Amino acid sequence: MRPCWRATALYACATTILVGVSSSAAVAQNDLLVCSINTGTVLRYNGQTGASKGAFVSGGGLSWPTGITRGPDGRIYVASALTNAVNRYNPNTGVTLGAFASGGGLTFPQSVSFGPDGNLYVGGSGTAVYRYNGVTGAAMGAFTTGGPLNGAFGIAFGPDDHLYISSFGTNQILRYNGATGVFIDVFATDPGLSSPYGLTFGADGHLYVASGSTSSVLRFNGTTGASMGAFVTAGSGGLGTPVGVVFGPDGNLYVSSNTSANVLRYNGTTGAFIDEFVASGSGGLTGPSYFAFVPTCGSGDINGNSTTGMDDLPGFIDVLTDVDTNPVHIAAADVNCDSFTDGRDVESFVKLLIP
């Protein structure tokens, strides 16, 4: 049981102390977790500055880390390519919680994503994407069927809940029914798309794909799949063999540049180069692949809208009074980062609202 200092009195105290606080929201704090293939580690960086915060995961059965995602339970899931498994880690400490998913035909896993149904989907070097129970990790077999898939090196569920896959061997983006796994169509292709890796949908609804061999990021119409050309032009900012592509909390596009061993940032609207967000080799980074922004402990962002504000107060109080036992919300309410959610977090929560 989590320590709680007089929960009933705390409710009144927290409500009183926050009365009159401006409803303007502060951006919730995030860490950036980057898979470093050559060192077999997951490294942690300040999500606002890019400064190294050291190793998040080192050892613990991890070998050739590639795909990474944060699960519905708040834990971190990492594809361990050379052990043909997806491992699970404590979101605050990086301590290993063991292999979560393996078997079922999976080989050399590259990309991981939780689907709308809460299950885990994993793409690898084969001709299918595999599904695992999102709670137990039990193999549920091959999910995708049909189509020219050859190497699912990037997967993402779209706004339409269908599954989009970078088919590495055929230089295509394929679309599969998100409920049945049945092949729908070759959604997108372009002469400039070669060795596609990560892909993501932007706030504009369009699809962005890392083109490894052309060192660029291409954009496709999110509805029709029509090519919109290079969003990040070849070699922009020193980009070389891009792998992971993620829109950050600031709305800009972040890209891992494998050959230059850094993470670059581009304007999320124009694609113009902004800066080297994670410096080359910072924290021991070599061979960066996929990465993820994750809330730091104590973000205070209980409702998950990427900001910390007065609209988080009801959820914050519910956690402290044990009404809400969701582990993601519990981690977010640990504002003073002492591994407990209790009355000692109130003052820190108020400070997030009053800069």
Image (cartoon, grey):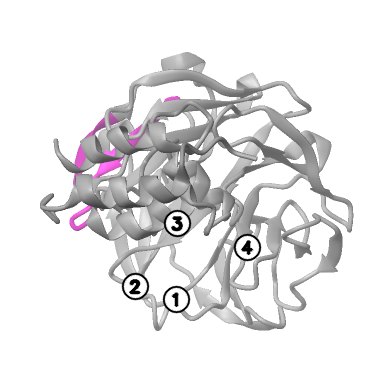
Check whether the beta carbons of the residues at disc 3 and disc 4 lie within 8 A of each other. no
Mark found first going from the N terminus, 3 or 4:
4
Quickly name the residue at label 3: 318
Whichever of labels 1 and 2 marks the residue nearer the N terminus, that label is 1
Relative to residue 103, is residue 293 drawn left or right?
left
- Cα separation, mark 1 vs mark 2, equals 7 Å
Q: Position of residue 63 (x, y in %)?
A: 74, 28
Q: Nearer the viewer, residue 141 or 331?
A: 331
- Decide if residue 257 is in sight here: no
**Given the image, on which type of amino acid does mark 3 rest?**
Asp
Residue 86 visible to the viewer: yes
Residue position for label 2: 205
Q: Is residue 274 magenta?
A: yes
> Could you classify mark 3 by the number of other residues whose Cα lies within 10 Å: few (under 14), some (14-19), or many (20 or more)?
some
Residue 278: assigned label: none
The Cα–Cα distance between marks 3 and 2, rounded to whole angstroms, is: 34 Å
In this image, 318 relative to 1: left or right?
left
- Above or below residue 189? Residue 309 is above
Q: Position of residue 352 (x, y in %)?
A: 24, 39
Asked which secondary structure carries label 3, the reply is helix
Mark in the foreground, 3 or 4: 3
The answer to whether marks 1 and 3 mark residues whose Cβ atoms lie closer than 8 Å is no
Q: Is residue 92 left or right of residue 227?
A: right
